[in-house]
Image: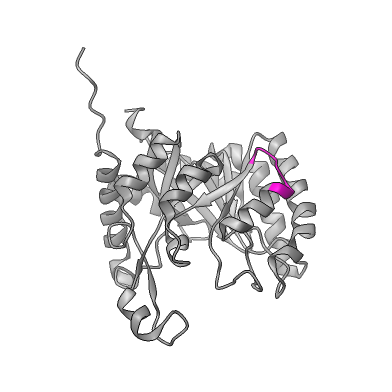
Amino acid sequence: MKALKDIRIGTMIRGALKDPSGYVRELVKLGFESVEPFFWQTMDADLAKLARELKEAIGDANVTIDTLGMFGNPLEETDIDRRTLAGWEALIDNAHLFGAKTIAGFTGRVRGKPIEESLSRYKTVWGALAKRAADKGVRLAFENCAMDGNWSSGDWNIAHNPDAWELIFNALPDENIGLEWEPCHQLVYLIDPIPQIRKWAPKFFHVHGKDATVRWDVIREHGVFGKVPFVQMRSPGFGDSDWTRVISELRLAGYKGSIDIEGWHDPVYRDELELTGQVHALNYLKNCRGGAEFIPNPA
């Protein structure tokens, strides 16, 4: 089983759910192989209690917690930004309770400024966090989502573009700083995600299972700045990416870890169809991986 599950297929769960352990029990029954608990801007949970309850919910199932998520802007200094930074620190310090080896989220950025003007603050904040994480044996992974920002301005994240990756990894070449990558956010930029795997896979510490559909008919009629959205975020199996090739390239590059589905974005499979879409994505990604079960070679 190990050879197949060097790449596990899982999903994200909100750490602030009323009953996260009950939710995880249902996910285990559905065949998810990993879970990524995550927090949005603030982390007010009792992490020791949450870790214990999630482990109890998993029981003896072969399900892991590879990565924890903390999404916000830790570079700025409003009250909620400081709470985001405190959340990163708390997750780093308590990752071992979950068995997690990676903490993922946004870099943050100096709001309303070009990416280069965030680098000084980035070095200060993430230099300290990288050392804290290294002391705990933890890696830090930046999601490649622009959060509606661009090179010139934005509110959340500078790590959304390959040119920005060059800047941040040159600014802090720490070995425990990398990416939480997904093809979706590159397709949103009309960037081919496949060459990125070959170039950047050594920095891929975690992968999100999220895809996109580029609506070329809309682009031809309305362009990319019109009122009609030219791209839709999709669950894997409903979008444009060839996930068989994505996973094959990840394997060839030596990636071992989880692909955790990031739900709640698909315009069709949402609300009452949310879990229907996620389970379809789960089974689709397992097929793209080579199947659901490991078949040993005959002696």
Quick one: which residue is furthest to the left in this view?
298
Horizontal and vertical percent position of residue 249: 39, 41
Relative to residue 17, is residue 134 depicted above or below? above
Which residue sits at x=60%, y=55%? Answer: 45
Residue 118 falls within the magenta-colored stretch: no
Residue 179: where, in percent of width, then height?
56, 49
Residue at 72% x, 72% y: name it. 113
Q: Is residue 22 visible?
A: no
Q: Nearer the viewer, residue 163 or 282?
A: 163
Principal SS element in the magenta part?
A: loop
Find the magenta span and give its range: 170-176
Whether residue 249 is visible to the viewer of this picture, yes or no, is: yes
In depth, the one of 110 and 70 nearer the eye is 110
| Among the 4 quarters of the image, the one containing residue 6 | top left
Q: 262 above or below 76? A: above
Can you give x and y, in whole percent of width and height, for residue 44 in the image?
63, 59
Residue at 58% across, 38% down = 97
Quarter of the image where the C terminus is located: top left
Residue at 29% in and 46% down = 244
- Residue 139 to residue 27: above or below: above
Looking at the image, the residue that sits furthest to the top is 299
Q: How many marks?
A: 0
* Residue 273 quadrant: bottom left
Question: Which quarter of the rendering shows the N terminus?
Answer: top left
For this rendering, which residue is in front, 291 or 99? 291
x%, y% of residue 134? 70, 36
User: Farthest residue toward the bottom?
Assistant: 227
Q: Is residue 150 left or right of residue 223?
A: right
